[in-house]
Amino acid sequence: MANQDEIHVFLQDFHVKMNIWGIVVRDDRGKNAQTLLDLEITKDFRNKVLKSLVVEDYAEGPLPEKLYGGADMWVFGKQVKGKEIYIKITMGIAGAQVICISFHIAEHPINYPCR
């Protein structure tokens, strides 16, 4: 588990890189796309949620990642329209977009160690 300073640095770097390079979201995963429909939110609104992540939203990580360039994955949770959203993100590869692997309604309660 990361400490609050490490989480803060990750989020700061993630937000800067997202603002510069943009984001790739795995909308090909059914539950990610379905969450947008279920909550009646746009992709832009989802991006605002990702940009609003703070240390207190941290759930776990960094976790090893093998499919998207090997940058560690971080898990966060956020309340959106009364639903708890499970969010898994990674920095991706250098010189390219950050990646949102998961953005869906949580199937189980999320533990927030920094709250």
Image: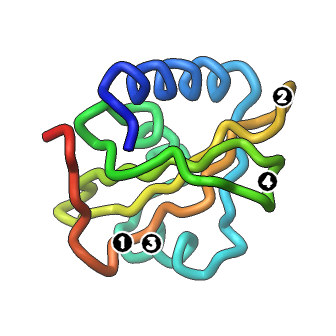
Q: Along the polypeptide, which appears first: circle 3 or circle 1?
A: 3
Instruction: For residue 46, say whether it is visible.
Output: no
Q: Residue furthest left?
A: 115
Quadrant position of the C terminus in the picture? top left
Camera-near label (4 vs 3) is 4
SS at mark 2? loop
Residue that badge 4 annotates: 68
Residues at marks 4 and 1 touching, judged by CB atoms closer than 8 Å: no
Mark nearer the N terminus (4 vs 3): 3
Mark 3 neighbour density, 10 Å: few (under 14) some (14–19) many (20 or more): some
Q: Position of residue 61 (x, y in %)?
A: 46, 48
Whole-angstrom CA distance, mark 2 to mark 3, is 29 Å
What's the mark number on residue 35? Answer: 3
Q: Residues within 10 Å of mark 2 (few under 14, many from 20)?
A: few
Indicate the quadrant where residue 79 lies.
Answer: bottom left
Helix, strand or loop for disc 1: strand
The vertical placement of 53 against 89, above or below, is above
Residue 88 tag number: none
Residue assigned mark 2: 94
C-alpha distance separating marks 4 and 2: 11 Å
Q: Which tag is nearer the camera, tag 2 or tag 3?
A: 2
Q: Are marks 3 and 1 in contact (CB under 8 Å)?
A: yes
Q: Earlier in the sequence, mark 2 or mark 1?
A: 2
Q: Nearer the viewer, mark 4 or mark 1?
A: 4
**Numbered tag placed on residue 105 in the rendering:** 1
| Three-letter code for the amino acid on which mark 1 is drawn | Ile
Determine the residue positioned at 68% across, 63% down: 26
